[in-house]
Image (cartoon, rainbow, N blue to C red):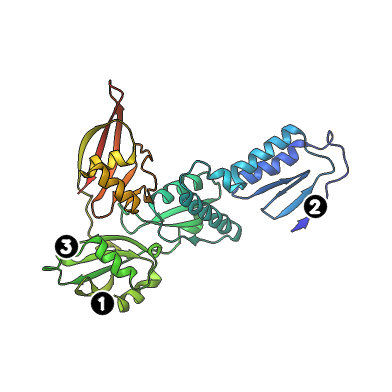
Amino acid sequence: MCTVRAPAMTAASLAAHSILRRAVHAILAPRSIEINNNKLSYYKTPRFIPLKTRLSSSALGICHLAQAMKGDVDVLVKGVGDKSTIEAVKQIIEKANRASLRREVLHTDFLLPPVLKESMLILEKLADTKAIAQGGYPQAERCRLSVGYSEDLMTAPDIVAAMSITGNFGFQPCSHGDFLGAILGTGIAREKLGDILVQGEKGAQILIVPELVDFLTSSLDKVGNVPVSCKRIPLLALEYEPPRTKSFKTVEASLRVDAIASAGFKISRSKLVDMISNGDVRLNWATVTKNNTTVSTGDIISVSGKGRLQIGEINSTKKGKFSVELIRYL
């Protein structure tokens, strides 16, 4: 880090706009600003500016605002979600900063939808660094992010590969969980695998990181009790349809996840509580640990072996209860 000494002058004669201009410049680029006592440092060149006198309260306030807006990752992720989502988003922001500093394109693994959504919202605020998501097809749930300068992203390669898994599934149909378990059983980590499109008797099509295509081709030979073969296919060969859903309404005394999930999946409240205790219930892809966790519009509840539902419109009734629209995935 190089050091630049400010000329000897009083705080009054020091042009405040000169210092603030540097802070604003940092705001306009995805860089960090640090303020320690009377020292302002920012990372573009990078350089470090020691001041002979402290910044005025107004100038210091603006610099702290700049720090919160761009440099302080903890501020950027405030209110994002649960702890695991926050940590994942922070890693992506840091990756974006590295991509910007090195002028290169970096890629994430496959991300859960909440992480993808929150990351995109934050990255949209950064001036230089942009992000594009690739999941293999338009309705993809799990996607990878490429982060870097806009012009560099235009020539970024595909970071998602498609594969088909075929076998004689006519007499032994396999579920999404069967395919997922078989793939993970080869040693592939979940974050290296995207969506799995189950196709009944034809088997399944999957999305995966390109560097693991050859490994899976040679390693996966069985799903359940069905011998299978794997091969890479073009992304354009993917067969997908919008999910089938069924909507209905329920009236509940509260928006607790155990009450809503019980109504949505037609499971007794006591059994649903047991499933929460066993870690079988997830809210927005995070395992539910408390029965009294509340839900809101747009949330996704999934129960192992039962499927998934989305929370639709929520309205209050005249009797003080909640009318909740539930969208069940079939």
Residue 149 can be seen, yes or no? no
54 lies left or right of 258? right
Q: CA distance from mark 1 to mark 2?
A: 63 Å
At horizontal 22% and vertical 43% (from top left) the residue drawn is: 268
Which residue bears the numbered disc 3?
A: 200
149, above or below 309, in the image: below
Residue type at mark 3: give it. Answer: Gly
Residue ranking furthest to the left: 171
Residue ranking furthest to the top: 318
Helix or strand or loop: what does disc 3 sit on? Answer: helix
Q: Mark on residue 104? A: none
Q: Mark on residue 4? A: 2
Q: Earlier in the sequence, mark 3 or mark 1?
A: 3
At horizontal 32% and vertical 77% (from top left) the residue drawn is: 219
At horizontal 64% and vertical 41% (from top left) the residue drawn is: 66
140 lies left or right of 103? left
Residue 275, image x, y percentages:
30, 50
Helix or strand or loop: what does disc 2 sit on? Answer: loop
Which residue bears the numbered disc 1?
A: 221
